[in-house]
Each structure stands twice: as structure tokens, then as C-alpha cells.
Amino acid sequence: MFCFWQNNFSFSEKEDFSDLPPNQRKKRIQQRIDDVTTKLHQETAAK
């Protein structure tokens, strides 16, 4: 399972939100979590 996450849902350096204010950082991170969750559900449904 770890390899699955690492291969398909890894973060790039471009997705480092540490320079953003806390509210924007939280919003961006939550968006990323939602995107990954959606992809996970799609791949799970496809299997």
C-alpha cells in the first residue's frame, strides 16, 4: 500500500505551501487531500 501512495500520489516540491499564510496553506492542503481522496475512490471503483 505504501508504494501505491508513493507512486501515484506523491507531492512535488512545487506543492510546498510553507510560504503561504496559515489560512491559505490550510485551504491548499485540504484541496490536495480532496484531490487525492477523489483519485483514490476512482481507482478503487475501477478495480
Image (cartoon, rainbow, N blue to C red):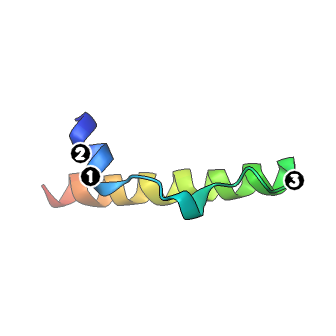
- The extreme left residue here reads 47
Residue at 84% over, 47% down: 22
Q: Are marks 2 and 1 in contact (CB under 8 Å)?
A: yes
Crowd tier of the residue under label 3, counting other residues whose Cα lies within 10 Å: few below 14, some 14–19, many 20 or above: few
According to the picture, the residue beneath numbered tag 2 turns out to be 4
Disc with the residue nearer the chain's start (3 vs 2): 2
According to the picture, the residue beneath numbered tag 3 turns out to be 21
Q: Is residue 5 above or below residue 39?
A: above
Q: Quadrant of the C terminus?
A: bottom left
- The extreme bottom residue here reads 14
Q: Mark 3 and mark 2: span between their CA atoms?
A: 31 Å
Q: Are marks 1 and 3 in contact (CB under 8 Å)?
A: no
According to the picture, the residue beneath numbered tag 1 turns out to be 7
Residue 39: quarter of image = bottom left
Name the one closer to the observer, 41 or 18.
Answer: 18
Residue at 54% over, 50% down: 33
Q: Mark 1 and mark 3: span between their CA atoms?
A: 29 Å
* Count of number-bearing discs: 3
Taking the image as shown, residue 45 lies to the left or right of residue 31, namely left
Taking the image as shown, residue 8 lies to the left or right of residue 17, namely left
- The extreme front residue here reads 13
- How far from the left and from the top, in percent, is residue 32? 56, 57
Q: The residue tagged with tag 2: helix, strand or loop? A: helix
Residue at 58% over, 59% down: 15
Residue at 68% over, 58% down: 28
- How far from the left and from the top, in percent, is residue 5? 31, 45
- How far from the left and from the top, in percent, is residue 1? 22, 35
Crowd tier of the residue under label 2, counting other residues whose Cα lies within 10 Å: few below 14, some 14–19, many 20 or above: few
Amino acid residing under circle 2: Phe
Amino acid residing under circle 1: Asn
Residue 13: quarter of image = bottom right
Name the one closer to the observer, 47 or 1.
Answer: 1
